[in-house]
Amino acid sequence: MKKIIISLTAAGLMTLSSAGITNFALAQAGLPAGVLTAAGEPVEITISADESVSAAELGVENPGILPSNPFYFFKELGRTIQRVFTFNPTSRVTLELDIANTKLAELKKVEEVSGDDHEAILDAVENYQAAQARLKARLEALRETSKNPEVDKLLSKLAERTIQHEKVFDELITRFDDSQEIKDIAEDAKGNIEEGIAAAADKEDPSNLVAKFEQALLEGEGGELKHIRSLEIIDRIQRKSSEDVREAFEKLRHGLGEQLEKDLNDVLDKDGVEGVGEAIEGLPGDYVRRSVILQEIREQADRRVSEAIRKISSSYEALIKGEEDLTQRAKEQMDRAAKVIEEAKKLLAERKDTTGVAASLLKEAEAHLREAGSALTNGKAGEAFGQARSAEVLARNAIRLLGEKNTTDTGELEKIFAEFDLRIKKYEMLLIDRKMTQENNPKAYALLDQAKQHLQYARDAFAKKDLAGANLHIGHVKGFLQDLARMIEGALRPAVEQKTIEPRTSDACEKILSEMRRLKELVISNLLSEKDYQIKSEALNKAYQECLGVKTPVMAPTPKPAPTIDPIIMPLEIEPIKPTSTTEPSIREFKIEADDAGFYPSSVLTVPRGAKVRITFIIRRENVYPAGLEVRSSKFKTGGLAPGQIGTVEFLADESFEFGSWWPASNVFKAGGKVVVQ
């Protein structure tokens, strides 16, 4: 990975050794061990070139005369003349947006040629802020909405520029971490950008505005984990937005979070934990906010991703504890957590929480917030921040669970249909813009067709008052579009050298399966005792899992099942239910029971590639914690299910993957399984 290397002062990090964070731990996380050097010594921080916004991306290859030039006033005079002779309100806003964009390119050039001159950089930032203030005023004065095609085009451009400008100031803050003055003015500039979006929001339907941001985030440059920054940007925009806009962005936030989880899995497959650490290391931005986002992803991810984030997060804990203004950070985090808790409470009052899981999470979040207040009162700012961060994560998980519940509000369903219509159109435009045709990208168009088809299935179910069916197909549409988004982003990234992965020996796996079948026949014929059968089948199961590449820590030990259940964990022992749907004849159905110890009758399913798969998870009433279980994977999540409840998921079998069960209230992993696609 090509990197831009910059030197920062590790101010305030002297206390880290006493905090028990070691150079070795940070090295294991893939981040610079140098952060543990004595205060005042420089450390190397790297920003990935993929994540750095270039002048070309801003559309300004050469910004011309810079603010530090004595003749710069001529340039400003020319802009004043342009303003005087621009009469159309929409054109005035567009002009101010272009001027602000050019001034940002000027700032980048000043930073490049006068990086040691802090006064020149401060002047350039102030120059940009003046342009941003004019842009905000023009947006507030604009009376037309996006129903005007020119305004719609303007708002799309504004979304794209907002993301780019936020990223540029993230880079500036990272590069000048040793200058509090530059950091403060850059933070103010980001706040002005976010206020500009708030001013533009009433010119656009929230769903349309969010769709524009989604498109800009997908098309934007960046590495494989660029959506960590996307989530940081969305969080900042939400701070200044109205309630309707915040709610619309929350949906995008959840979707990108799920997409990020899949991206993390991909990087883990390719480069391991060190590769993930290196990719995150190259992301500029607010590492305090990032620690909350990573913790949130960890809470809902599968075990492998969760464990990787745990290892990487030690570095962020170190940096947070080294913050000189940690007390202020703790107060800000407590305020943010309190706002998210209030949003969760409001949503809980509006929607049914039949399992009680969301209410339990919310109660726990409030307890953490109280603990944060007590810690801060006692002068323990670090503990206060940690408690407040946990409070926000728990509250956001409650919102996520409530958002995943099937809606019975017909008005809400109609709104969701309209949102997906809009998103599908945006994705069609993206495919065309990127010259991704049916011929050179058949899989992309297959996903788009699946999304359209299931959206129609949802509408058909809604017309028949089958709200559960409508919700089910909405979930499929969401999944297909997420997969399509990842495919588009993959096509936008430059080709990278892939590591060679040795193919698995399918013949060896088949021999193990044959032996498992033979054992089954012997025990049925009473030619093998139950005891010998159990011993041999456990050994074969372990060999089969290793053959499939299932790591032992992921697979929970399976206890001896009840006499009525077939004890062998054998993928062929689950007979698919015969298809019942006339509209989707190729679907493969399975029923799996689950408790705190495992999945029954098998934790391994084998399905043909390309099949549509439906799994019904039945949570047993015995040997299950009262809060129930949630089954998660990179393909699906059931949401919290109480003992005795049933959850159904569907997905397209295009790759093998692992799934697991978790206690939803405390995020404790219980058991693992695997879907094997052949």
Image (cartoon, rainbow, N blue to C red):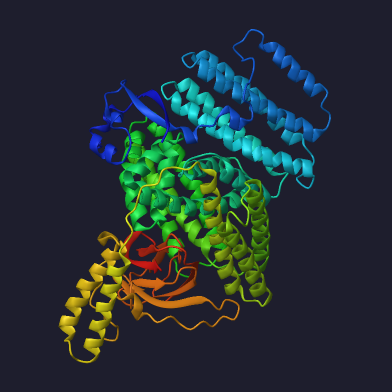
Of residues 346 and 56, the one nearer the viewer is: 56
Q: Nearer the viewer, residue 450 or 566?
A: 450
Left or right? Give the position of 396 relative to 643: right
Q: Split into 4 quadrants, where in the image is the C terminus?
A: bottom left
Number of labelled discs?
A: 0
Give the percent coordinates (x, y) of residue 293. 44, 46
Q: Who is closer to the viewer here, 288 or 149?
A: 149
Q: Is residue 667 above or below residue 95?
A: below
Q: Residue at x 33, y 41 (%)?
A: 383
Residue 444 in picture, x, y percent from top left:
57, 57
**Residue occupying the point 67% across, 78% down:** 464
Q: Left or right? Give the position of 122 relative to 576.
A: right
Among the 4 quarters of the image, the one containing residue 162: top right
**20 relative position to 117: left or right:** left
Residue at 47% across, 58% down: 398
Query: Residue 659 at what x, y percent from top left?
Result: 38, 64
Query: Is 82 situated above or below 615?
Result: above
Which percent across, then down, holds residue 106? Answer: 60, 21
Going by the picture, which residue comes out furthest to the bottom?
A: 525
Residue 122 in sight? yes
- Mark yes or no: residue 10 visible: no
Quarter of the image containing the N terminus?
top left
Q: Which residue is outermost to the top?
A: 70
Quarter of image, res 469? bottom right
